[in-house]
Amino acid sequence: MRRILLVEDNELNRDMLSRRLLRQGYDVVLALDGEAGVALAAAVRPDLILMDMSLPGIDGREATRRIRGEPALRHIPIIALTAHAMTGDHEAATAAGCDDYDTKPVELPRLLAKMRLLLSEHP
């Protein structure tokens, strides 16, 4: 079973997405902020990280940079999740080290396709 780290501060988004991922057969680990996301990435070594970009404390871009700075973690695919679909948001997420980008509200089939692609590239 593939382990997904979901870093999301919004309770409704976190609950909805985690339940949907569990139904798809993923093991889901939850982090409520960027600091916890970095710590849990190191502790549980997930197969993929879904990283909200707007987090309290350190934001998703900084959390991603910290994860990418750790040699043991830098191979883990990261998908940025954001409600901001402004010009430059995708570029900022990829510049921080995210492998892909998806907007909220999440369209599950689209997100699952991105996840499957990244997981197949990182067995």
Image (cartoon, helix red, strand yellow):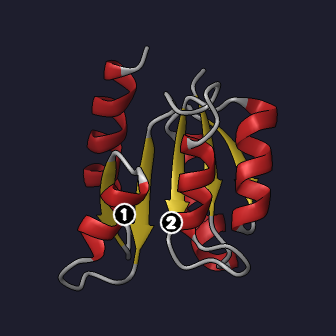
Instruction: Decide if residue 61 is on the left or right side of residue 85.
Output: right
Instruction: Report x, y in % for residue 92.
Output: 33, 69
Identify whether 106 is placed above or below 84: above
Q: Quadrant of residue 108?
A: bottom left
Q: Name the residue at 73% across, 79% down.
A: 57
How far across and how far down the image is residue 52, in percent? 53, 67
Position of 73 with respect to 109 (left or right) is right
Q: Residue 107: horizontal and vertical position, in percent?
A: 31, 63
- The residue identified by callout 2 is 61
Relative to 123, say whether 53 is above or below. Answer: below
Q: Which residue is mark 1?
A: 93
Q: Quadrant of the N terminus?
A: top right
Q: Amino acid at mark 1?
A: Ala
Q: Could you say whether the residue bearing mark 2 is in a helix, strand or loop?
A: helix
Q: Which mark is residue 112?
A: none
Circles 2 and 1: CB distance less than 8 Å?
A: yes
Q: What is the quadrant of the C terminus in the image?
A: top left
- What is the crowding at mark 2: few (fewer than 14 residues within 10 Å), some, or many (at least 20)? many
Tell me residue 15's x, y (percent): 66, 66
Going by the numbered disc 2, the residue's amino acid type is Arg
Instruction: Identify which residue is drawn at 64% across, 36% down.
Output: 70
**Is disc 1 placed on a helix, strand or loop?**
helix
